[in-house]
Image: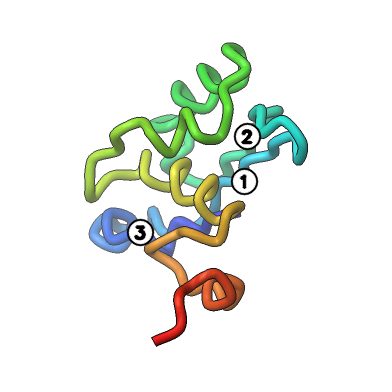
Amino acid sequence: MFPFRALGRALTVDDRSRGFVKVLSDAESGIVLGVHIVGPPASDIIGEACLAVSSQAHIDDITLTMHAHPTFSESIEEAVERLEHKAIHIFDPASLRNSPKA
């Protein structure tokens, strides 16, 4: 799950920082099973979510797709990257376990 309030774009548009994107994927295959989008920007990004589900996209297909910055579509990529503890717009304590020691 990724909250809109963590996106720079959401913070620049009045009343658009409410809500979140949640991506559901199969733990073994990595196939996207569903996407929940709650909040005002949902209509701007629902197309990518529908395409991912209908084409049985792998989560890597989403992370390898270019997402312009700053945009609301980044929230889908960030939600997927959060599954792997790699999201860059939100602090994830689990990401510290995966980082190299200095």
Alpha carbon separation for disc pair 2 and 1: 6 Å
- Looking at the image, is mark 2 or mark 3 earlier in the sequence? 3
Q: Residue at x 57, y 54 (%)?
A: 84
Residue to which mark 2 is pinned: 35
Residue to which mark 3 is pinned: 7
Counting every numbered tag in the picture gives 3
Alpha carbon separation for disc pair 2 and 3: 18 Å
Alpha carbon separation for disc pair 3 and 1: 15 Å
Of the 4 image quadrants, the one containing the C terminus is bottom left
Q: Residue at x 22, y 47 (%)?
A: 69
Cβ–Cβ below 8 Å for labels 2 and 1? yes
Give the class, few, some or many, for how many residues have Cα within 10 Å of label 2's Cα (few <14, many ≥20): many
Q: Please say if 102 is above or below 56.
A: below
- Image coords of residue 7 (percent x, y): 35, 59
Residue to which mark 1 is pinned: 22
User: Looking at the picture, which amino acid does disc 3 mark?
Assistant: Leu
User: Looking at the picture, which amino acid does disc 2 mark?
Assistant: Val
- Image coords of residue 91 (percent x, y): 48, 74
Cβ–Cβ below 8 Å for labels 3 and 1? no
Q: Residue at x 30, y 38 (%)?
A: 67
User: Looking at the picture, which amino acid does disc 1 mark?
Assistant: Lys
Q: Residue at x 69, y 36 (%)?
A: 25
Q: Please say if 41 is above or below 83.
A: above
Residue 92 location, quadrant:
bottom right
